[in-house]
Amino acid sequence: MPFARNIISALALVAVMPAAVQAAPSGRPSHDFGGEEALERIRAADANKDGVITRPELLKHRTAEWPRLDRNGDSYFSKEDLPGFARSRWDSGRLATMRQTYDTNRDGRISRAEFSSGPTPAYDMADANRDGRVTEAEIKSAISALKQS
Ligand SMILES: [Ca+2]
Ligand SMILES: [Ca+2]
Ligand SMILES: [Ca+2]
């Protein structure tokens, strides 16, 4: 049933929104940056499955996510990429925050370049020692730090 499928793909779209979608305006990590879920999601970028997520792995993963955002393939993530019934959400909540985070030139849409070079707050928070490698231990301790805050 196509309608049901549309709903599911819209939900999937929200689910793949990168962690950075919810960066706090101040740039400081907070629950708003996606929280535990965003930290958990970093693991998916571990392409070579060695238990360490390097920054290049993260960025490559982000690039791989792009077609799921830019559904009409015009190289921008914009309102037009959302299914009709979800378009009213473009100006509120997670999508508005996502635009605040990535739409550097403020043209109301996110270009491929803006997205692929955009901020990575969840990763930065997890990479406690700033060596460009996020280990399983760092993910776990970031999650437990979040739970205590
Ligand atoms: Ca790895
Ligand atoms: Ca598009
Ligand atoms: Ca833009």
Image: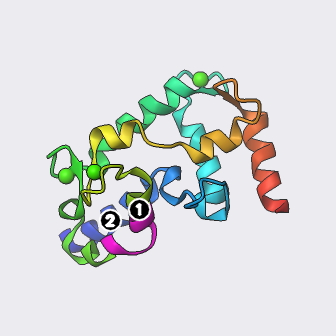
Q: Position of residue 26 (x, y in %)?
A: 60, 58
How many numbered marks appear? 2
Q: Main secondary structure of the magenta part?
A: helix
Tag 1 residue:
14
Residue 65 location (% of width, % of height): 37, 42
Asked if marks 2 and 1 touch (Cβ < 8 Å), the reply is yes
Mark 2 Cα within 10 Å, few/some/many (few <14, many 20+)? some
Is the residue 138 above or below the residue 24 in the image?
A: above
Q: Residue at x 54, y 42 (%)?
A: 120
Q: Residue at x 80, y 61 (%)?
A: 147
Q: Which residue is mark 2?
A: 10
Asked if residue 68 lies in the magenta stretch, the reply is: no
Horizontal side of 52 relative to 114 (left or right) equals right
The image shows residue 29 at horizontal and vertical percentages of 66, 54
Looking at the image, residue 137 sits to the left or right of residue 123; the answer is right
The answer to whether one can see residue 41 in this image is yes
Q: Amino acid at mark 2?
A: Ala
Q: Amino acid at mark 1?
A: Val
Q: Please, is residue 26 above or below residue 45 in the view?
A: below
Q: Residue at x 54, y 38 (%)?
A: 44
On-image quarter of the N terminus: bottom left
Q: Secondary structure at mark 1?
A: helix
Query: Please, which residue is most extreme toward the right here?
Result: 148
Q: Reply above or below: 23 against 87.
A: above
Location of the C terminus by quadrant is bottom right
